[in-house]
Amino acid sequence: MVSNNLRAGPPVLEVEGARKRYGATEVLKGVSFNVHRGEVVGLLGPNGAGKSTMIKTLTGVVDLDGGTIRFEGTPVKHLGAIPSVGVMHQDFGVIDEMTVLENMRLGVPALRSAGPLLSGKREREAVHRALGRVGLDVPLGALAASLSPAERAIMAVARLLDVGAQFLILDEATANLSHQDARRLADAILSGAGAAGTTVLLVTHKLSELTDWADRAIVMIDGVVVRDSHVKGHESEIVRALAPDVERSSPAPDSLHAGSSGDSGARADTLFELWGAGTERFGPLTLRLNRGEVIGLTGAASSGIHDIGLVAAGVRPLVYGERKVAPGIRVALLPGNRETEGSFDDLPVTQNMTLTALRRWRGPLGSMRLRQERRDARDMAARLRVVPANVSISQGALSGGNQQKVLFGRCLFEEADVLVMCDPTRGLDVRTRREMYARIGELKAKGVGVLVLSSDAEDILELCDSVAIVEDGHVGALEDVASLTVSELELMV
Ligand SMILES: Nc1ncnc2c1ncn2[C@@H]1O[C@H](COP(=O)(O)OP(=O)(O)OP(=O)(O)O)[C@@H](O)[C@H]1O
């Protein structure tokens, strides 16, 4: 796919011996690396390795305790105020309620006519030019909310490049994008007019993005850089550095699908149905989920798949159609957007894990068995390898991937018959992703029915028996996953 034609120039960014601790926890233990002009460098590492902390020190969100940062040869405290540095996070910094034009002109000096009056014409021309540079053709009056995820991301890049950014830090910015959308974004950044000198530092867990896009990979583990090499020709060594035991811990496809073969004791009775169901965002959808079955619905995050998840879990009401849950069946939800839908930063990890299953720890007189609750949370954290393993700390002190493990632990505590999982592996490292697949395989083998709503092709291929594509809220026919390859699925989404 795209490649940055320019040969790597001198180092733009040099980080030497970066150290950072949060209280007693030393998170960065002397991190050193550099990034050359025109390079695309992937910063990778397991959940909790310190990648976000490294980016936060680079962008000035938190201060380093020790070490140095040099930008274009000059020592700096951080890169936060340097105009040629642009940072993009998962939400792209786009405001949904504003138009494309308004988003593009946010925070930049207004273009005026001769006097103090704003020149609408000059503003529109400037935005047209900026969007043209990244090949984005969207109406300037359209609300950002109406754009596809790829368009929103590309618009955000256009805005950064327009204000002179040449060094882009993408901090898991592609986590919510499908493979195809991430490619479009890469194309926009690296193939856009004048993009030859653009340098990219890319934090990602998606190995496909690394191989598609990056020249070099820096692997961090436990606060230090353990590997720094070109990507091409070193792919398997990079995977091994990231997850030494991934092959061993990877579940065999047969064990993942044991539930549907009937040899696991799972019965093929119906747990849950949607009949001609829909809201203003999707539908009509008819779907039947049986015991031990995993059904996937895939499409871009904006396609309505998460809305289907909320409706399926009974969290959001249907506008039309019917949702039928067999008597006594419990449905648990892993929400798609933990930041706004169910992760409570200020509450301890224990409560984040247990809050939807408190009945488990209720004593005979209704009082809570708090010690048992904490003990169970500690066991669950150990089982899911939450790091750090201290369940008394606040959820907000965990890395994103570890927060996701806590929410998965919450689903497991619910002992539900139906699990509705929206983008279950978002932000998970390679090994943890494999472990989650294995855990879901175990649930399936026990007869739990799982509905996976994911824009990640690997989730669908590893977990699901059948899949339907969702496009602009329209749900296609269910297809047998066994007949699909990764690339076929990626092309479909
Ligand atoms: N505000 C905080 N207070 C205390 N500890 C923190 C805080 N933020 C992060 N940590 C700890 O620092 C370590 C590194 O976290 P960081 O978010 O940098 O990891 P990461 O590599 O980005 O992980 P992920 O891939 O899961 O996003 C973790 O152990 C985390 O618990």
Image (cartoon, helix red, strand yellow):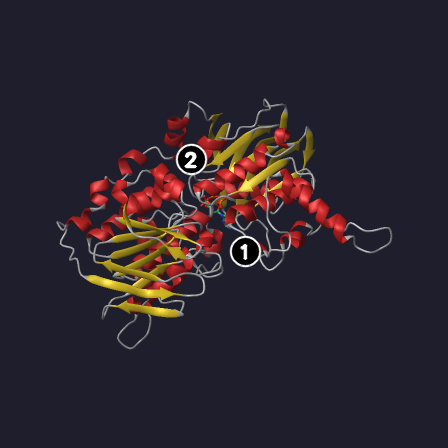
Distance of label 1 from label 2 (alpha carbons): 28 Å
Residue that label 1 marks: 146
Q: Which mark is residue 379?
A: none
Of circles 1 and 2, which is in front? Answer: 1
The reply, left or right, for residue 300 in relation to residue 193 is: left
Residue 208 is labelled as 2
Which secondary structure lies at badge 1?
helix
Earlier in the chain: of badge 1 and badge 2, it is 1
x, y percent for residue 194: 65, 32
Foreground of the two, 324 or 381: 324
Name above or below for residue 356 compared with residue 252: below
Label 2: few (<14), some or many (≥20) within 10 Å? few
Q: Position of residue 375 (x, y in %)?
A: 32, 58
Q: How many marks can you see?
A: 2
- What's under tag 2, amino acid-wise? Ser
Quadrant location of residue 233?
top left
Under mark 1, the amino acid is Ser
* Residue farthest toward the bottom in the current orientation of the protein: 365
Q: Residue furthest right?
A: 115
